[in-house]
């Protein structure tokens, strides 16, 4: 991946047309996996996950890196499943508390996405706000060093967006409750499952 590459989260939802045979679906899966391996080798496809799914649902989260949104669209259009798929693309911006380098992947841990919506209450003085931000940065660094905080980005909505790995959901909940900014934040958490083509 080039140092100047942009990162994108892509939610890929596949709807198999009615009447498609199982053999056609299996063939499509095989070709999609082969194309994914090529994108991984080229440094464009960084991670793949399964979100919680309803029966019969086919949905995947992908972390991609390309030069820009136009290049990303070209890559997505090259994937065989695109003919059956709807893609929701979210650009991921730099966050000052992102671990550098990224925390190594722990194959034995459970992974989670978190979305942080921050609302600073009225009447909080600037010194308190800045001190809380500084404490949040220290806590993020400590959680990265402990192997829990893997990545942290900013969404276009200015919300924080994190990738975490912990032994249990309860462990993550305790970590999130310990964040200095927690009293001012609403946190949405999405548990992630392994994807068979995930490069990690």
Image (spheres, grey):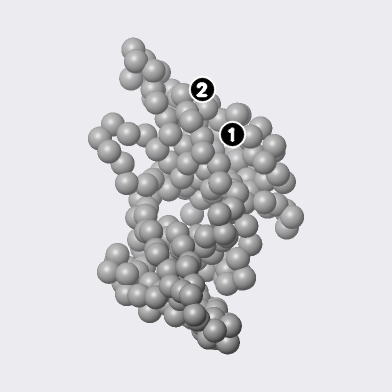
From the top left corner, tell me how far across and down residue 198 is, in percent.
47, 47
SS at circle 1: helix
Which residue is pictured at 37% across the width and 59% down the height?
189
Residue projecting furthest to the front: 123
Of residues 48 and 133, which is closer to you in this image? 133
Q: Residues within 10 Å of mark 2 (few under 14, many from 20)?
A: few
Which residue is pictured at 32% across the width and 69% down the height?
173
Of residues 134 and 69, which is closer to you in this image? 134
Of residues 62 and 118, which is closer to you in this image? 118
Left or right, residue 79 beside residue 172: right
Number of the label disc, if any, that sits on residue 76 = 1
Q: In this view, does 6 lie above or below 169?
A: above
Left or right, residue 86 beside residue 100: left
Number of the label disc, if any, that sits on residue 83 = 2
Q: Is residue 104 above or below residue 133?
A: above
Which residue is pictured at 32% across the width and 46% down the height?
52
SS at circle 2: helix
């Amino acid at each position: 991946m080039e140092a100047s590459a942009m990162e994108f989260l892509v939610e890929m939802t596949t709807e198999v047309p009615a009447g498609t045979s199982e053999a056609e679906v299996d063939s499509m899966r095989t070709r999609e996996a082969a194309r994914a391996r090529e994108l991984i080798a080229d440094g464009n496809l960084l991670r793949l996950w399964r979100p919680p799914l309803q029966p019969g649902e086919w949905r995947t989260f992908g972390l991609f890196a390309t030069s820009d949104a136009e290049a990303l669209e070209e890559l997505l259009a090259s994937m065989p499943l695109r003919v059956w798929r709807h893609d929701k693309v979210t650009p991921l911006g730099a966050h000052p508390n992102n671990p550098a380098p990224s925390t190594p992947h722990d194959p034995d841990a459970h992974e989670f996405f978190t979305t942080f919506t921050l609302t600073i209450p009225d009447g909080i003085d600037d010194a308190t706000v800045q001190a809380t931000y500084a404490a949040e940065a220290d806590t993020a660094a400590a959680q990265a060093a402990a192997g829990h905080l893997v990545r942290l980005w900013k969404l276009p909505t200015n919300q924080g967006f994190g990738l975490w790995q912990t032994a249990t959901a309860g462990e993550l909940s305790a970590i999130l409750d310990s964040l200095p900014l927690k009293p001012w934040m609403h946190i949405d958490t999405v548990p992630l499952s392994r994807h068979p083509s995930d490069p990690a």
